[in-house]
Image (spheres, rainbow, N blue to C red):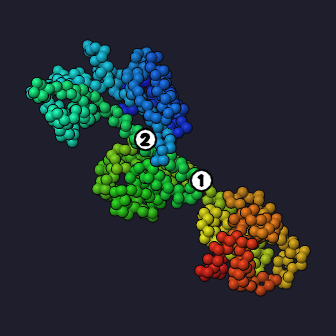
Amino acid sequence: MHTVLDPFAVALSGVIGPAILCEDAEGRVLLANDAWVRLVDGDAEQHDPFDLLARLGPDEVERAREMLTRGLETVQPVEFQTRIAYDHTAGDWVTVSRIPIRDAAGTLIGWVTSIVGLVGHLDPLGLSGIEMTKEEKEARLAGIGAWELQVATGELWWSGGVYSIFDRDPATYAPSYEHFLETIYPPDRDEVVRRTESALAGGPAYDVRHRIVRPDGEIRFVREKAEVERGPRSEPVRMIGTVEDVTFEVIEARHRRRAAKALTTLSKANAVLVHATDEETLLEQMCTAAVETGGYAMAWYGRLQPGGSLEVLAIDAQGPALAYADSLRLERGSIVDLPMDANGPVTIDDVREGAEPWREYARDRGLNSVVTLPVRHDEVLDGFLVVYSSEHGVFDSGAVSILEEVAQELGFGLGRLFANRRINGALEGTIKVLAATVELRDPYTAGHQARVSHLAARIAEEMSLSESETHGIRLAGLVHDIGKVTVPTEFLTRPGALRPAEFALIKEHALIGEELLSSIDFPWPIATIVGQHHERLDGSGYPRGLVGDEILLPSRIMAVADVVEAMSRFRPYREALGEERAIEEIRTKRCTLFDPDAVDACLGILEFGYAFEGTV
């Protein structure tokens, strides 16, 4: 941050393009570019559009405050011109715009504020020492000039403002209509001639935007408006018009559009991050957010491989980009080499300058720019998010800064999923050890928990439960009889019927299992599932005699799987009753003891030849 020189003067001396501030819907700063930071001389993370009021002259403050407040209250775009003061002078004229950004549903997701006019140097048009009226100086500062064309002779007169816009020296340059046409950017020339001839012939008024080429090769955007004066026979005598340099208006609009596109992508990415429960879904939906919400042509994610290549894990594309992906066989599992930098984004503003084979394929299919964004989690580089656009140069500093946030959010999401995976792996290891402990004490039921776990998970899948819910049921099944560790082994292994007191003791195993597991912080209600797997819909179950929906759905599923497996196989106190008897049991007691949806799902699975063997 500058401390000696006036920061606005420094900004004026070095900034090409608008100062931009991007915020989310709550006013949190997403991006403040260097021009904005230098303009308000503050901390970029704490900026506010109202900060610029401190830079205005006393006559400008209230009107600017009113305009900004109106936009905030009405959630509508506002635009106004004002002077920004520096070095105790009146300062230069700038255009301030504040635009609300909405997603496809029309919901406000943020704001883009821009200030245009910070170009050149402290005397950008060389006005010092030139004798001009105040009005003439302000016109040249504003980038406006006047001209007059004599139709019969082609003689052209320019004001000083036009010379300044076209960067021509009035002492050496003699304007004429032919010379004027030579300054027009070639692709725009025919349209300017057509519009001129149409206006002279009595058609629509002359009002045209086009590009010009200055002597140094710089391309500028201008808007011309003119009226035709006619003679006594309605013949055109002369055209009198104005020309305005709208270069920074065009650039500002591009910056706003590009920032808005990146901002909508970030908004959708945040929503994806909240809801994604697995890596595949997270990566696919992030790419979809860039394409379907952000409007980019293609996006894919590649994980870094040991040799430095990328393995494609997710991809989405639209329009001609689909053919591009097909040409390069870009799909899940593809191995790709691409220009990238682990330390920051790499942008190719024009793929014609890129490397083969990307250059040829991309150019032929309408892809014109690309950015690769490194994605990290836990301080480790995981891979790159690669985004393509059909526009040249769309990935400017503002857009890339916002897309970097998308990459950071993606890295955070991947890190969270990896951490959950490690935790879940440790929990599963604990569960398997506990399951093995029970089965060592009861060899007759060895594998029973694993078989119940497998069948219960299949029932959950058949009922279209989520992947996470199904996984929780699978884990609960592996330890649903963990409470039997407190039951004497002879009760579990002795042939013949149990005495009432012995059976009462065994019935405690569900409650004991729940107590044992309740101290472990699972992401699923495993302890409750274990405690309820002997409950029945009519309240005849144990240990609490719960009724209907008082029993969790996973517990109701576990009850069906447990009964079917137990009846189908041998027990010390009886022979195996067989699968047919088990099917009859759950079918006849559907809705009275057992959940009807769980029964129907189980019957459907068994009818398709489900077998317990080999599931341990």
Separation (CA) of disc 1 from disc 2? 28 Å
Residue at 10% in and 24% down: 232
Locate the C terminus and report the quarter of the image it occupies. Answer: bottom right
| Residue 434 seen from this side | no
Q: Residues within 10 Å of mark 2 (few under 14, many from 20)?
A: many
Which one is earlier in the sequence, the residue at label 1 or at label 2?
A: 2
Q: Camera-side residue: 97 or 370?
A: 97
Residue at 11% in and 29% down: 235
Quarter location, residue 233: top left
Left or right? Give the position of 504 relative to 293: right
* Label drawn at residue 259: 2
Q: Camera-side residue: 33 or 573?
A: 573
**Which residue ends up furthest to the bottom in the rendered image?**
575
Circle 1/circle 2 CB separation < 8 Å: no
* Label drawn at residue 49: none
* Label drawn at residue 416: 1
Left or right? Give the position of 16 relative to 581: left
Q: Height in image: 262 above or below 578? A: above
Q: Camera-side residue: 434 or 191?
A: 191
Q: Residues within 10 Å of mark 1 (few under 14, many from 20)?
A: some
Q: Secondary structure at mark 1?
A: helix
Left or right? Give the position of 19 relative to 426: left
Quarter location, residue 482: bottom right
Q: Which amino acid lies under the numbered mark 1 shown in the image of this protein? A: Arg
Measuring from the top left, give residue 423's x and y in whole percent.
65, 58
Q: Which amino acid lies under the numbered mark 2 shown in the image of this protein? A: Ala
Left or right? Give the position of 224 relative to 391: left
Residue at 34% in and 60% down: 323
Residue at 22% in and 32% down: 205
Quarter location, residue 119: top left
